Image: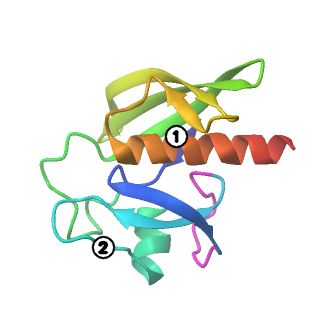
Amino acid sequence: MLAVPCPYFLPRAPAEWLGSYPRLPLGQAFRGECRAPGPPLEPDGALLFEVCNTGYAAPRCSRFPPASPAEAVRFHLAAQREARLVILYVTERAGWPVEHGELEYDPAEDTLMPAPADAALAAQARAFARTCLARRA
């Protein structure tokens, strides 16, 4: 099971890792968009690499909402059914589970079933699945 970036971080494209964190939650660093309340923001520098990409942003990011139901999301590759990946996810706060579910990723269509309502969760799950597939190739 791997920790995933801030629940408000919507990964868009791989980025060259510039941080000191020993393990990247999605298997590689990503550039993307902050979906926390406030004006649109594409984080960069230390904020992107040391906070958005590594999760648990609450004490380190001024945009992170204090009343957020989740501080992190964890993903686990549970199985592979033919070409599709079965991914389990858990959102958590203070290390405790808040919500959980199962998603099935279809690499041919780049889709998740069921489709998560939360855009950041969907983008993180797709990024996680793509990284898993790339590592297997």
Q: How many marks?
A: 2
Q: To which quarter of the image does residue 20 belong?
A: bottom right
Q: Is 46 left or right of 68, judged from the image as shown?
A: right
| Pointer 1 or 2: first along the chain | 2
Three-letter amino acid code of the residue under disc 1? Ala
Write the start and end of the magenta stretch as one range.
17-26
Disc 2 target residue: 41
Tag 2: residue type?
Leu
Residue 8: image location, x then y, percent: 32, 54
Residue 6 in the image: above or below residue 96: below
* Disc 2 packing (10 Å; few <14; some 14–19; many ≥20): few
| Residue at numbered disc 1 | 125
Q: How is the image coloured?
A: rainbow
Instruction: Give 37 or 94, whichever is nearer the viewer.
Output: 37
**Near-viewer residue (82 or 67):** 82
Q: Residue at x 30, y 69 (%)?
A: 60
Of all residues, the one furthest to the bottom in this rendering is 45
Q: Magenta includes 21?
A: yes
Disc 1 to disc 2, C-alpha distance = 21 Å
Q: Position of residue 1 (x, y in %)?
A: 59, 35
Dot 1: element: helix
